[in-house]
Amino acid sequence: MSTPEDVPALETVDVSCVFQVNQGFMRGRRPLRAVNGVSLRVPRGKVVGLVGESGCGKTTLAQILLGLLRPTAGDVRYDGVSASTFGRRDVARRIQPIFQDPYSSLNPTKTIRSIVSLPLRIHRVGEPSEWDDRVMQMLDMVGLPRRVAGSYPSQLSGGQRQRVAVARALIMRPEVVICDEPTSALDVSVQSQILNLLQDLKDELGLTYLLISHNLAVVEHMADRVAVMYLGRIVEEADTETLFSNPRHPYTRALLESVLTPDPRLGVPDSHLGTVFPNPIDPPSGCTFHPRCVDCMDVCKASAPTTTVEAGNRVECHLYGGDGKSRAAA
C-alpha cells in the first residue's frame, strides 16, 4: 500500500508519559511528567535530531516510539496510522533501535551470527535456510568481515560491536531506526566511521532516522531537522541550518554556546545554566525554564508560553509573539 509523501513515517501527537514516584515512608506518591505534550513529525527518508540535557525525557520518548512504554495521553502514529492498531511484533518490524553501548546491548554468550539472525528467528522472516545468507549479506553491508560471524562480542572492538548492533537493527529492513546516542560510547576516532556508515545505509536502504543525542556536532552533521527538548517539552524545532545559525529559544542558545571549540584561547565555555537541573516532580511555575533563563521576564514566571510557528519552524517562548517576531526589544 502506497503512502502519501506528506504523511510522516513516524509522528507523535500531544504525547505525555507520567510516572507515579514514591516519595518515601508516609509521604505517598507524586506524578513525574517525563514527557509532557510532545508533538513531533519525522518525515520519511529524513533524519530528525532530538537534543537536550540528560533527564529531559529523550529516552522515555524513544521507549514510547518503540512500543516499550504506553503513553499516558496522546497518540503515536506510523505512516499516519495509530500505533494502537499495531501489535508489538508489527511495531518491531517497522521501527528498530540502535543503543548507546554496543557491549551491554549484545548478548555476550551468543555468537555474532546468532545475534544478527535473532530478529529473523523471532519474527519468522523468510525461510530458515536463507537466514545465514542474509546474515552474511548484512555483515558485508555494515563493513564487517564474514569471519566474525563465529566470534563473540568480547572478541570485537567497540566499533565492530556497534556495527553488529547496526546489522541486527537492519536485518529485517525496518522503515525507521531510532539511534539513541549511537556513538557516545565509542572512541572519537571511530565515531565518524559509524556516522558515515549510518548515513550510507540511510541512502542505500531508504531509511528514516530519529537521532537522539546530546552531542550537537553529531546532530549538525547528520540531521535535516532538530528538535530541542527541555523538561519533557519540545521548546524549539527548526531545520538544522536555521537552528544552528539562528537559535531562538534561550535554552537552545545556551546549549550551542556550551559546545567546546578547537580554539584553546576561548577556554571552557559557560552555558550560564548552572549545575542544578529542575526537579521534574516539582517543576517551576509558568515557563519551566525561567529559573535558568538569562532573558526571563515577569510573564515567564506566571504563565506557560504558547508555541509560535514561523516558516515551518516553531519555538515555545514568551520572547516571541504570534507573528514570530521577537518581543525582547519591546
Image: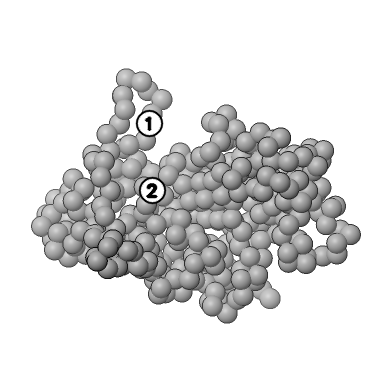
Q: Secondary structure at mark 2?
A: loop
Point 85% across, 64% down: residue: 127
As drawn, 217 above or below 96 = above
Q: Which residue is mark 2?
A: 54
x, y percent for residue 128: 85, 62
x, y percent for residue 198: 62, 46
Res. 204 visible in picture: no
Residue 260 has which mark? 1
Task: Decide which of 282, 93 is in the foreground and name it.
Answer: 282
Point 50% across, 61% down: residue: 63
As drawn, 234 above or below 189 = below
- 2 lies left or right of 135: left
Residue 229 has which mark? none
Which is closer to the viewer, label 2 or label 1? 2
Which image quadrant is residue 13 in? bottom left
Residue type for callout 2: Ser
In the picture as drawn, the residue positioned furthest to the top comes out as 265
Task: Decide which of 145, 111 is in the foreground and name it.
Answer: 111
Count of marks, rendered view: 2
Q: Secondary structure at mark 1?
A: loop
x, y percent for residue 65: 51, 64
